[in-house]
Amino acid sequence: MKKLLIASSLFIALFLVNQGSANSQALYFFVTNNTGVTLNNIYVTPAETGNWGNDILPNDLFENSTSVRVDIPADYGSTCAFDMKITDLAGNSITFTGMDACKLHTLILNADGTYSAVE
């Protein structure tokens, strides 16, 4: 009985450690829209791939002068280097490459197509 209890305790401990490391891989940062227009999509991809995947914007629309938290899916792996594509309602898009999402806290999008990064 004692061996069963110890084995069960070890199994539960290993499960909790694995859950914690899986959750810690998920990255997130904040995006502030100072572009002067409403945005409607944010796509990210690991820098070494070309597939944009799904829109990760948490809302349908991203109004000017607002901020949102975006979460990079954990299944994108452990990389920190990401590319980002952002689209507006008129169908225009802009792409930023080689962003370090592991250090990024806030990405501020500017009206001239540039961005500022706050780590």
Image (cartoon, rainbow, N blue to C red):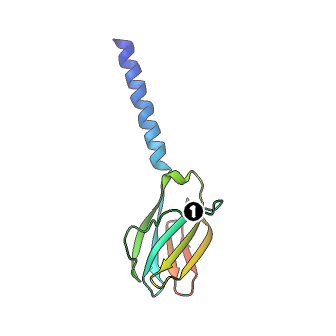
User: Residue 4: x percent and y percent?
Assistant: 37, 16
In the current view of this chain or complex, which residue is farthest to the top?
A: 1
In the current view of this chain or complex, which residue is farthest to the left?
A: 1
Q: Quadrant of residue 95?
A: bottom right
Residue 115 falls left or right of residue 89: right
User: Residue 76: x percent and y percent?
Assistant: 54, 54
Residue 32 falls left or right of residue 50: left
Q: Residue at x 48, y 71 (%)?
A: 42
Q: Quadrant of residue 71?
A: bottom left
Q: Amino acid at mark 1?
A: Thr
Residue designated by label 1: 45
User: Which quadrant: the N terminus?
Assistant: top left
Q: Residue at x 63, y 70 (%)?
A: 97
Q: Residues within 10 Å of mark 1 (few under 14, many from 20)?
A: many
Of helix, strand and loop, which one carries label 1? strand
User: Residue 99: x percent and y percent?
Assistant: 60, 67
Q: Quadrant of residue 112?
A: bottom right
User: Which quadrant: the C terminus?
Assistant: bottom right
Compared with residue 70, is residue 73 higher up or lower down, i.e. above or below?
A: above
Compared with residue 14, is residue 56 higher up or lower down, i.e. above or below?
A: below
Q: Residue at x 55, y 62 (%)?
A: 101
Compared with residue 3, is residue 93 higher up or lower down, i.e. above or below?
A: below
In the current view of this chain or complex, which residue is farthest to the right?
A: 48
User: Residue 66: x percent and y percent?
Assistant: 39, 78
Count of labels in the image? 1
